[in-house]
Image (cartoon, rainbow, N blue to C red):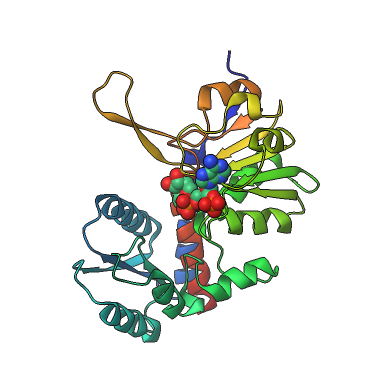
Amino acid sequence: MSLGQIIDGKAHALRLRADIAQAVIAAQAAGARAPALAVVLVGEDPASQVYVRNKIAACHEAGIISIEHRRDATLSQAELLALVAELNRDRQVDGILVQLPLPPHIDSAAVISAIAPDKDVDGFHPVNAGRLATGLDGFVPCTPLGCLRLLEATLGDISGAEAIVIGRSNIVGRPMASLLIGASATVTVAHSRSRDLPELTRRADIVVAAVGRPEMVRGHWLKPGCTVIDVGINRVAKESGTGTRLVGDVAFAEAADVAAHITPVPGGVGPMTIACLLENTLKAASRA
Ligand code: NDP
């Protein structure tokens, strides 16, 4: 029997998106122009195309203008940097999102570093990463920001809680750890070299899994009554042998028997990522 209460990321995201749409209307009533997000997509990666389409639809619904810049996979790094420089200068553009991954001949770090930090709504620029790590205001990456919003909505104050973040990527794990430290949790960051991950995980009141390994975190790794945020999105073959399905980094059914709260995949963290992108774009526009 499942004991865990499912954290409905979709419902939380819809509420946040409605609040953002209201704020956009209020800002326009006060004389501001609509916030504008430039979305750059290089190449034909099918997953990236879906993400970009969803982000643009969400912008539209919230009253945020989105300007799409599609380029062939053959675009040179110099051409992409020139486009970013042009968007940095454009006073009608509040936020810039360069969809990752970029084709292998382009140095992603160089492109991210070329985005003006004030327009970096993905929060990947080293200036924003540094701001987050030092507790200063800046742009926070959308996925960990969404995870924090879900944790706070579910648990309220998390100060003093023992948290483990499994994964140390710049996009999820590290910024997640910084956010949890900022919320006064006691934070362990685990990765592929960590010893005895099950034992480390069993100590935690909050488990954030951002690994990219299907159902790696098992039910018996968890402390009874903990809260599990599953960031993983993994496509696996269906048991029936035909087609595929999405699973997280956590073995959901087992974990739901032990945890008090758990996010599903899909329908947990994913929808919050897009809602937080809108939040960051609104923030960029209000600052401008
Ligand atoms: P990365 O591949 O960049 O990072 C994975 C991290 O997991 C690394 O730090 C790695 O450790 C660690 N790791 C790998 N294997 C193990 C292991 N066996 N034990 C412990 N740690 C391990 O992935 P991302 O952070 O970009 O993404 C993680 C997952 O989240 C993916 O499934 C991705 O699809 C999903 N995702 C979901 C989003 C959403 O909106 N819901 C947004 C972004 C990502 P090491 O550093 O030592 O190599």
Q: Is 212 rendered above or below residue 88?
A: above
For the N terminus, the image quarter is top right
Q: Is residue 55 left or right of residue 72?
A: right
Q: Quadrant of residue 85?
A: bottom left
Q: Identify which residue is drawn at 56% across, 49% down.
A: 167
Which x, y percent locates residue 122? 47, 64
Name the residue located 70 percent from the left edge and 70 percent from the top edge.
134
Foreground: 21 or 142?
Answer: 142
Q: In the rendered view, tell whether residue 280 sits above or below residue 256.
A: below
Which is more toward the observer, 143 or 105? Answer: 105
- The answer to whether one can see residue 16 in this image is no
Question: Along the horizontal axis of the image, is 13 left or right of 154?
Answer: left
How many numbered marks appear?
0
Q: Position of residue 75 (x, y in %)?
A: 22, 73
Q: As drawn, which residue projects farthest toward the top?
A: 1
Nearer-the-camera pick, 285 or 174: 174
Would you place residue 220 above or below residue 118 in this image?
Answer: above
Q: Residue furthest bottom?
A: 89
Which residue is rendered at x = 60% and y = 27% of the image? 5
